[in-house]
Image: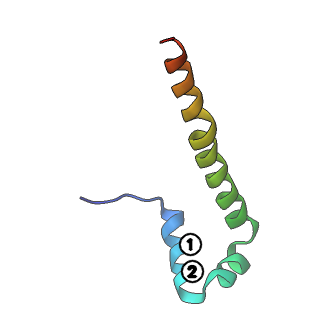
Amino acid sequence: MSFQRPGFIDEWLKIYRDGGLFHLLKVRGWTVVIAFFLFYLVRDSVLYILVPYLAYSNLSSCF
C-alpha cells in the first residue's frame, strides 16, 4: 500500500537528511516552527479536549 504525503514534507525531509535540524530551520525558518506548533495544537486538542468531551456527553445520558 502506498502512503501519500504532501510534497513539502518530502522537501523538508530531504533538507533534514542533508544537514540536520539546524539546517532545516536555517533554510525554512519560522515555517517549520509554526507547522510543528499547529500540528501539536490540533493533535492535543482532539486528544485531550474533544475525545473526553464526547465520551462524557455520551456516558452522562446513560445515568
Q: Residues within 10 Å of mark 1 (few under 14, many from 20)?
A: some
Q: Identify the residue shown where x is 67% and y is 52%.
A: 38
Position in image of residue 11 (x %, y %):
53, 72
- Marks 1 and 2: CB-CB under 8 Å? yes
- 55 sits left or right of 39 in the view: left
Q: Quadrant of residue 34?
A: bottom right
Q: Is residue 33 above or below residue 14?
A: above
Q: Quadrant of residue 4?
A: bottom left
The one nearer the camera, 40 or 63, is 63
Position in image of residue 42 (x %, y %):
62, 45
The one nearer the camera, 7 or 57, is 57
Secondary element at image label 2: helix
Q: Amino acid at mark 1?
A: Trp
In the current view of this chain or complex, which residue is farthest to the right? 30
In the current view of this chain or complex, which residue is farthest to the left? 1
Q: Identify the residue shown where x is 59% and y is 28%.
A: 53
The residue that label 1 is drawn on is 12
Position in image of residue 36 (x %, y %):
65, 61
Position in image of residue 13 (x %, y %):
52, 75
Q: Is residue 48 above or below residue 33?
A: above
Secondary element at image label 1: helix
The residue that label 2 is drawn on is 16
In the current view of this chain or complex, which residue is farthest to the front? 63
